[in-house]
Amino acid sequence: MLSGWIARGRAWFSRIQSRKKRGHRRRQDAAGRRAITISEIVGKDAQETFARRIAYLRKLDPLVFEELVLDAFQKEGWLVQRNTRYSGDGGIDGRIFQKGTWWGIQCKRYKGAIKTDHVKQFVRDLRNENLECGFFVHTGRTPAGVNLLSEQVTILSGQKLIRLLEFPSR
């Protein structure tokens, strides 16, 4: 019970801190607009709609993509702790909390297959941050065997990613 209140406080405080920074606020606002755009992208069938949405995600600013993913987890009921600084290319991009556990988030925009070294580095980053598990969220292809690298990491891509990011049209 107490950990839930502490998590709410951390999530609330991180949101306030990140909104104070103009660059964060601009990217968070852009993520909200991009979420609407994604929901409005429609092809002639489900496969074309999926392909167009993934192609759109691959062209987004990487930091807007991070904010978009964090917003999507928040929409799903997770408490979100945003970083006060963007990590650049490496490190944990954010933390989410649910059912007494903090998870790390790593977001990558790929055109091709993900690199196993990036997933291995994410596992090391989780350990360094004392996080038990995390989501590796990406727009590329997941090679066979990557899902078996660590029980700590859930790979989120493809249709699962698109479903997570589907915001209702306004």
Image (cartoon, grey):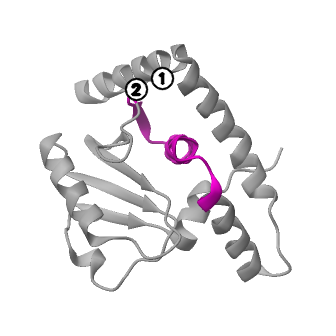
- Could you say which disc has been placed on residue 11 in the image? 2
Q: Is residue 93 above or below residue 112?
A: above
Q: Which residues are magenta?
A: 58-85
**The residue under label 2 is which amino acid type?**
Ala
The location of residue 169, given as percent across then percent down, is 80, 49
Image quarter of residue 129: top left
Q: Is residue 135 left or right of residue 76?
A: left
> Residue at the location (52% across, 41% down)?
63
Query: Badge 1 local density, few (<14 within 10 Å), some, or many (20+)?
Result: some
Disc 2 is placed on an element classified as: helix
Image quarter of residue 87: top left
Q: Is residue 164 left or right of residue 121?
A: right
Image quarter of residue 108: bottom left
User: In the picture, which quadrant includes the N terminus?
Assistant: top left
User: In the picture, which quadrant includes the C terminus?
Assistant: top right
Q: Verify whether residue 33 appears in magenta.
A: no
Query: Badge 2 local density, few (<14 within 10 Å), some, or many (20+)?
Result: many
Q: Residue furthest bottom?
A: 144
Q: Is residue 32 left or right of residue 21?
A: right
Choose between 124 and 154: the one closer to the eye. Answer: 124
How many numbered badges does the structure rendering display? 2
Choose between 35 and 4: the one closer to the eye. Answer: 35
The location of residue 84, given as percent across then percent down, is 39, 24
Rounded to the nearest whole Å, what is the CA distance between mark 2 and mark 1?
6 Å
Q: Is residue 67 above or below residue 142?
A: above
> Residue at the location (48% across, 68% down)?
157
CB atoms of marks 2 and 1 within 8 Å: yes
The location of residue 118, given as percent across then percent down, is 29, 62
Q: Which residue is mark 1?
A: 15
